[in-house]
Image: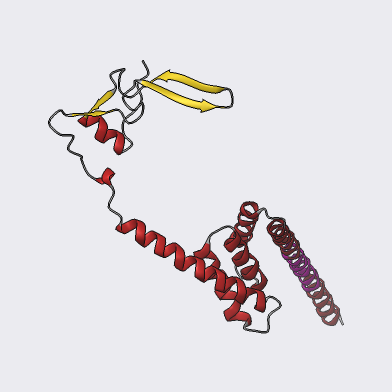
Amino acid sequence: MIKTNLLFFLFSIVSVVTLVAQTEKEKIQQIETQKQIDKQRKLTTKLDSAIRLSEEGQYEQADAKFKAVLKEIRSVPTDLTYHFGKNSFLLGKYKQSVDWLTKYVQLKGTSGQYSEAAVGWLSQAEGELIKEKEREAKLASEVLSSDFTIDCGPTGKVACTICKGSTVVVKKNYFGDTYSTCQYCHKLGYLTCEEYNMLLKGKLKPSTE
């Protein structure tokens, strides 16, 4: 009888300990679940705020919000790829726009809520990206005089291009003309060949005298 009571007592203790442990585990799980819910709610609020800013034409602010959301998530919502891609286009970031809109089209095909709009924005972004690359290629192929040292001839001097040799700079404003002494040619009306080439390269600084 004593053994039976003892066994029952021990069994009761084990049951209570197990129940307490399970209860604590459940509490911890509930706390973690609530944390995840709160985090998701905050992210959703940030995303909604970014979308609203974009719709209001505040593309820079929206871009910063979208990036803040992306830093805090592991799995990117499909709708975010559309909104971020669209905002990137409106911001003039065509490569970024093409990248994100392509993701949306790949994931949703023609069945997504924004599929038709995404295809339209993507087509525009791709067109602008091609133009951008063409402009970059053209600039890269241009040969500018500032890339070379210009021979100024036997005199070694060139009429100052700032004041046109007059030693005086004339500026027009709403109240009329204002006159000031040229700060580049030292009141001489001309530049030395070295000064002239520095001016072409944007390296000649005005005199403070």
Q: How is the image coloured?
A: secondary structure
The image shows residue 5, relative to residue 36, as above or below, that is below
**On the rendered image, what quadrant is the C terminus found in?**
top left
**On the rendered image, what quadrant is the N terminus found in?**
bottom right
Asked if the stretch drawn in magenta spans residue 29, the answer is yes
| Residue at 71% in and 77% down | 113
Report x, y in % for residue 28: 74, 65
Magenta segment main secondary structure: helix
Camera-nearest residue between 154 and 199 = 154
The image shows residue 155, relative to residue 63, as above or below, that is above
Q: Is residue 73 visible?
A: no
Camera-nearest residue between 60 and 131 = 131
Asked if the stretch drawn in magenta spans residue 206, the answer is no
Camera-nearest residue between 79 and 199 = 199
Left or right: residue 189 compared with residue 77: left
Report x, y in % for residue 168: 38, 20
Report x, y in % for residue 155: 15, 28
Camera-nearest residue between 70 and 178 = 178
* Numbered label tally: 0
Q: Spot the residue most to the top.
A: 209
What is the magenta range? 18-36
Name the quadrant containing residue 70: bottom right
Left or right: residue 126 compared with residue 78: left
The image shows residue 31, relative to residue 13, as above or below, that is above
Q: Is residue 104 visible?
A: yes
